[in-house]
Image (tube, helix red, strand yellow):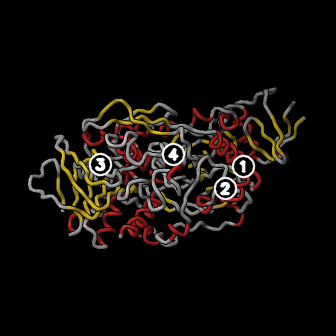
Amino acid sequence: MKYDLNTERNYKHKKYDVCICGAGVAGITLAVELASKGKKVALFEGGAEKYTDTSQSLYEADSVGLTYYGISGCRLRYLGGTSNHWAGRTMLMQPIDYVHRDYFPLPGWPIEKKELDKYKDRAFSILGLNSNSLDAPKIEQLRTSSMKRVGYGSTPPVRFGKKYYKELMQSKNIDLFVNASLTDLRLDDSLEYVNKLKITNYNNKTFEFSGKKIILAMGTVENARLLLNCNSQLGKGIGNNSDFVGRCFMEHFQVFMGEYSINPENPLWSSGVKLEFFPTDKFALDKKIGTSVISFGKADSRSYGRLKAIKKVIKESVCPSDTLTKFTKNIFDFNCPGDGVITTLCEQSPNKKSRIRLSDKKDSLGLFRVSLDWQINELDKRTIKTLAIETAKEFARLDLGRVKLKEYILSDEIEEKLGAHCHQMGTTRMAKLEKDGVVDMNSKVFGVNNLYIAGSSVFPTGGGVNPTLTIVQLSLRLAEHLS
Amino acid sequence: MILKNISRRDFIKSAFVGFFLTKTPAQPDFSVHENNDFSMTVDGDYVVINGWILLKSDVEIE
């Protein structure tokens, strides 16, 4: 059943088993799974069924740290959320992501890989992947001691709002509320239990709801923003005893490492295999660095190689956000001499100084907006430089061609040349202990018995992988836990 | 330091010379300059010249 809170007159209050705030990848996956297990679910979407400027404007925010174009435009605020402009690429977290890396500033994943592997097949099915979609082709000539091939899935992107629309409308166990923004969580007298949600429409009328379990699934920025705004009962906000809410904002660095010229005699170039490197676990651990997909975009005179695919996706996604268009202007303007460019999807280590804070500006619903202070640390700079040099060496050693690295890779000016992938993560990180995070190993907020968080804001590390598959796996795991 | 006898392998020569001379191979009218300054470091089996990561066997330095 669907209710539009802008116009709804006849809704009668119910108490739900689960209230989910945010109808994107995580929220819809959770709603569908929990409903299928007999739970009564309220799913709140702050936007409408389609894009509106009114809803999207609530995402406006400032950026005060490293240049970051995507604080608003990376995210979409309507049914389906950011899946509405997802490009369809995905990857599994790698074994190294679950290893304790003592050179990282903060602890990593407190759960083992097998915990998420349990949900791999179901997540594949949801995202339209085949069981062998992520098998990396074995190419002996590309086997090196420092680099390996990894499996990428590329699928016609799933728009969760469209895919699950019928199910959301017809399920007896799901009430979908649109134009329904979460504006406050109220705790009971113990301050350890959420007993009310305040949901506000665009006429600033507020409705109260309640549920046995509450899940925030509004995305990395909004999950943290809401918790920080809920500061009338707990001065630092809900779930913020350890001062981690909003901190450890992570992205995947997009770095143009250099250009390359191919050795046309190497049969790889005529084989049709798409070349990508990924550091072996041993190399990354020995060098004490993070990881990254390293891509070799082959250029042609018309379309600048890999950028052609990116431009095509952007054109076809009919993304209504002007900010995203501005963000990609660098790509449209980029010119590539030689045979191609080398780019990255590079891990950012968790950094407490990279964070979102509340600003002094309020949105139309009365919530403080955010200010992003995106920061890079010395470990991340070393990761980029080490991987760039090793990539160039392996490229030469394998006689694939030769690489010319960008000057800023070899100097200390990398900060000015960083881009990002719109993979926002980490602001309510998962941890074994409250002192290291916001949610526990079951994604429950420390100190609040019935509040959970879903999505990439709980990632303690981001790996060098696209996050969508992990988001779905975690959502399925949380659904099972709450069943 | 003079860079001479750049590898006879055409793809290295044409690309390296093209980038080195600040024109791209795609532009047909690039010209050859002499006595350019360049920076070079040796890193094990590799030579780094103006950002190019080459094998030692790719070039001769005099």
Tell me the subunit letter for badge 4: A
Residue at (50, 33) in percent of width and height: A67
Q: Earlier in the sequence, mark 3 or mark 1?
A: 3
Kindly tell me whether residue A385 is visible in this rendering: yes
Tell me the subunit letter for badge 1: A
Q: What secondary structure is marked by label 1?
A: helix
Q: CA distance from mark 2 to mark 1?
A: 9 Å
Q: Is residue A126 above or below residue A300?
A: below
Same chain assignment for discs 4 and 2: yes
Q: Earlier in the sequence, mark 1 or mark 4?
A: 4
Q: Is A405 situated left or right of A49 in this image?
A: right
Residue at (22, 48) in percent of width and height: A179
Q: Amino acid at mark 3?
A: Leu
CB of mark 4 within 8 Å of CB of mark 2? Answer: no
Q: Residue A40: image x %, image y %? A: 25, 67
Tell me the subunit letter for badge 3: A
Q: CA distance from mark 3 to mark 1?
A: 49 Å
Look at mark 4 in the image and give the residue it sits on: A250
Q: Amino acid at mark 2?
A: Pro
Same chain assignment for discs 3 and 4: yes
Asked which quadrant contains residue A14, the reply is: bottom left
Look at mark 3 in the image and give the residue it sits on: A185
Look at mark 1 in the image and give the residue it sits on: A390
Q: What secondary structure is marked by label 3?
A: strand
Nearer to us: label 3 or label 1? 3
Q: CA distance from mark 4 to mark 2?
A: 20 Å
Look at mark 2 in the image and give the residue it sits on: A279
Q: Quadrant of the C terminus of chain A?
A: bottom left
